[in-house]
Image: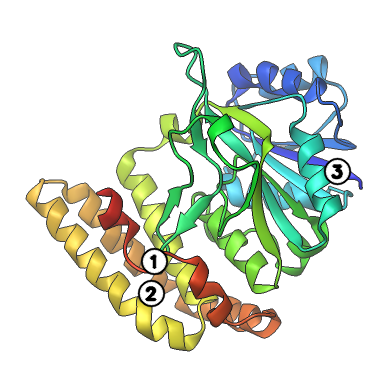
Amino acid sequence: MKISLIVLNYNGKHLLKDYFDSVNIQTRSPDEIILFDNCSVDGSFDFVRKKYPNVRIIKEDSYNTGAVLGLNIASKYATGELFLFQSNDVRMDKNCIKVLEEAFKKNGKVGLGTSVSLTANRTQKEEFVENAGAEMDVIGFTWPLHYGKKRKEIPREEEVFCVYGNSIMVRAEIFKTLGGFDEKYFALHDDIDLSWRVRLLGYTVCYHAGSYVSHLGHATLGKTYNRAQKRYWSERNCLRTMLKNYSLKSLCIYLPFYICILGAEMGYHVRKFRFDLCIAIIRAIGWNGFYLVDTLKKRIYIQRIRKINDSQILPLLYHGSLKLRFGR
């Protein structure tokens, strides 16, 4: 199966040597490598062009497209049967790509697969699991699966509801059918939304512990945007995901629950004098009101092409609030 590796970069020159060196040691090399450089001004373009001439660079100089649109644009240039989307702040184990490809070859029902992400803490002798995919509750909040465990302690392979996007492989045909990532998201929750839509087509989502990466963790996003801005993106995208992907019956049941939890959160933030986080939530709701027509258009398409109903989706979700469960 032909594999297209797609990676996004924004002022990440300091990350690229370690990243591409880990690409070059793979026991199963990608058939093509595409880097989408998003308005970098740190010399990333020239560095990659000179040091890694096998990498095809798609360069955006006019405006910052955000992670989601950037990945969608790059995917237009990809010719593989499998798309592997990765962050530039990961370092792959040498068998990372090989193991993921084997999982797709073995089971035609796997639509989306992810590597296990390990914390890249060089002060520790052993890295611990950052996530092996994620579980999701009925109001769209996610929590990393097997967080804090050692990699050898977790199952070798396991079905999960959704994945985080630092190393994910998806069948190109499915990705194109779904229209790629939702370009309104800019950043955050786009991977959760894609996982949900892959499932609605009747495919499974899995992690594979034999495929793993060390992850620096928000090496780009965390340094560029503050907590309130990230909370705004996360909350607005979470709400849009629910509005698009749930059946009408499920939406009527779980949307009021979501609103109650959101109200309680705002009250908590007021008590802590975190008015910036309250404003972020209000902005997120307002954004969804402004783009409601667009969301409904997306919803109509998703509900039309879905192959399974919510009776098959809901048993996979946590029936409660993971925010309350984990105190976040």
Q: Tell me if residue 243 comes above or below residue 183 in the rendering.
A: below
Amino acid under label 3?
Ile
Q: Secondary structure at mark 1?
A: helix
Nearest the eye: 311 or 32: 311
Q: Nearer the viewer, mark 3 or mark 1?
A: 3
Name the residue located 55 percent from the left edge and 73 percent from the top edge: 313
- Expressed as whole percent of the image width and height from the top left, the position of residue 225 reads 40, 37
Farthest-out residue, bottom: 249
The residue carrying pointer 1 sits among few (fewer than 14), some (14 to 19) or many (20 or more) residues within 10 Å by Cα, namely: some
- Type of amino acid at the residue the image marks with label 2: Gly
Give the class, few, some or many, for how many residues have Cα within 10 Å of label 3's Cα (few <14, many ≥20): many
| Image quarter of residue 202 | bottom right
Regarding residue 37, the answer to whether it shows in the image is no
Q: Are marks 3 and 1 in contact (CB under 8 Å)?
A: no
Q: Is residue 325 left or right of residue 211?
A: left
Residue located 57% across and 35% down the image: 117
Read off the residue under disc 3.
Answer: 3
Q: Are marks 1 and 2 in contact (CB under 8 Å)?
A: yes
**Mark toward the start of the polypeptide (3 vs 1):** 3
For label 1, the residue is 287
Q: Which residue is mark 2?
A: 289
